[in-house]
Image: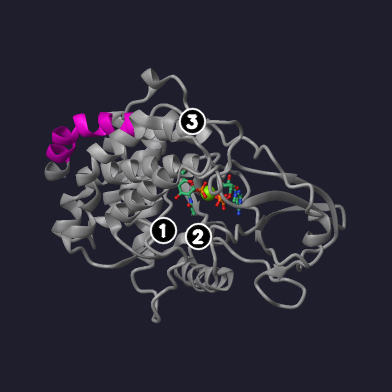
Amino acid sequence: MTASPNPAPNPRHDVRAIAREFQTDGEIVSAEPFGSGHINDTYRIVCVSGGVPQRFILQRLNHTVFPNPLAVMENLQRVTAHLAERFSGQPDAHRRALALVPARDGKPFHRDAAGNFWRVFPFIEKTQAVDVATSPAQAFAAAKAFGQFQKLLADLPEPRLHETISDFHHTPKRLAALEKAVAADAFNRAALAKPEIEFALRHKAIGGALLDANLPERVTHNDTKINNVLLDDATGEGVCVIDLDTVMPGLAPCDFGDLVRSAANVAAENERDLAKVEMSFPIFESLLRGYLSEAAEFLTAGEKSLLPVSGQVITFELGLRFLTDFLSGDAYFKVRRAGENLDRCRVQFKLFESIRRQESAMSKLTSAI
Ligand code: ADP
Ligand code: GN1
Ligand code: MG
């Protein structure tokens, strides 16, 4: 399934005028909402210079979600520069690392009069982002790209990256946030989500499975859903890892777990027919093989042994986050319809059960590789 357009471009933003604040050549001939990310406002811009069109991504950083935009931009500059250096000299190097187009004043972002932070990236041509993996080969390619991403960033020079969202994958704190939202019930929605709230409390024990394992801190992506890697139209290979706002210190199995959550679910993230939701074992196997094709050389035995449970943890955690957002009036994740965050939560909890049922098979396979 190819990423569908974002539903609600914000009419308050004059995106063409904002695009003109960046060092792009020529006349801006179009600016359309693009992609299906849940957080930022993303537009595809076409500039024409000397009759030649060139495409860019123009994006407003969601500063409600990322309270320190300068820290995000600093991380982004360091990470993209490091990746560019690591890919330099290799075939297709210019498509492999996300790059920033500077603003006219030389800064890596433009701040508009309302205080919004905007940035521009060259559009990575001849690629697609998919919301659901359509084949094991596609899952392998995506997981390999994220494994390579962790590998290439292992020697990012000091200092430690900023934590752009604190406790992002701290599942017990996510549960505490849910409990707070239930107690406040600010939108009178708790009664609509009684079974889901009970489910969350019943399964809280899974929350510490990665955090309590004393794993090494690494530079991780933290948002490895499958539509955050661009796949080559011709070869299907993972070309470029994108959406780098959450790249920060983290745990390697969290990245693998989010891949399982997003790519091994055969149904859409907001599917209403829960009978369709399950984890595909062949996709899991391809994710594992793809990820390990790059990560096996640096993972510790402890990290590797937690890969089979990581999908459960991150799926449970995202279920908590969707539920909390539903109860809090949909302030965090973009929604296209009323109740969408509750539907998304139900999908995650159903998927969690499916992943859990397959735990011993996943462990057996992981030990055998
Ligand atoms: P969000 O944080 O809202 O998910 P993303 O940075 O992931 O925002 O961008 C949303 C979507 O825009 C991506 O899933 C992808 O489809 C598309 N996209 C983002 N950057 C690029 C790029 N440089 N080239 C091509 N497509 C891109
Ligand atoms: C968000 O930005 P996007 O759409 O790639 C979210 C992830 C969730 C994901 C669920 C910064 O990712 O944590 O797993 O939605 N990103 C942030 O689809 O919260
Ligand atoms: Mg994204």
Q: Which mark is residue 270?
A: 3
Q: Single out the mark in the foreground, 3 or 1.
A: 3
Label 1 element class: loop
Three-letter residue code for mark 1:
His
As drawn, 154 above or below 193? below
For disc 3, the neighbor class at 10 Å (few under 14, some 14 to 19, many from 20) is some
Which one is nearer the viewer's eye here, 130 or 289? 130
Residue 321 picture location, percent across and down? 41, 45
Front residue of this view, candidates 150 and 317: 317
Q: Is residue 223 visible?
A: yes
Image position of 227 (left or right of 56): left
Q: CA distance from mark 3 to mark 2?
A: 23 Å
Q: Does residue 236 show up? A: no
| Magenta stretch contains residue 352 | yes
Badge 2 vs badge 1, beta-carbon distance below 8 Å:
yes
Earlier along the polypeptide chain: callout 2 or callout 1? 1
* Residue designated by label 2: 244
Front one among 33 and 240: 33
Report the amino acid beneath label 2. Leu
Q: Position of residue 59 (x, y in %)?
A: 66, 56
Magenta residues span 349-365
Residue 260 part of the magenta-drawn span: no
Secondary structure beneath label 3: loop
Establish whether ligand 1 lies closer than 8 Å to the Cβ of label 2: yes
Alpha carbon of mark 2 to alpha carbon of mark 1: how far?
7 Å
Mark 2 neighbour class, 10 Å CA radius: few under 14, some 14 to 19, many 20 or more: many
Earlier residue among tags 3 and 1: 1
Per the image, the residue denoted by label 1 is 221
User: Left or right of 275: which side holds 239?
Assistant: right
Residue at horizontal 17 percent and vertical 64 percent from the top:
214
In the drawing, does residue 312 fall left or right of residue 111?
left
Res. 350 image quadrant: top left
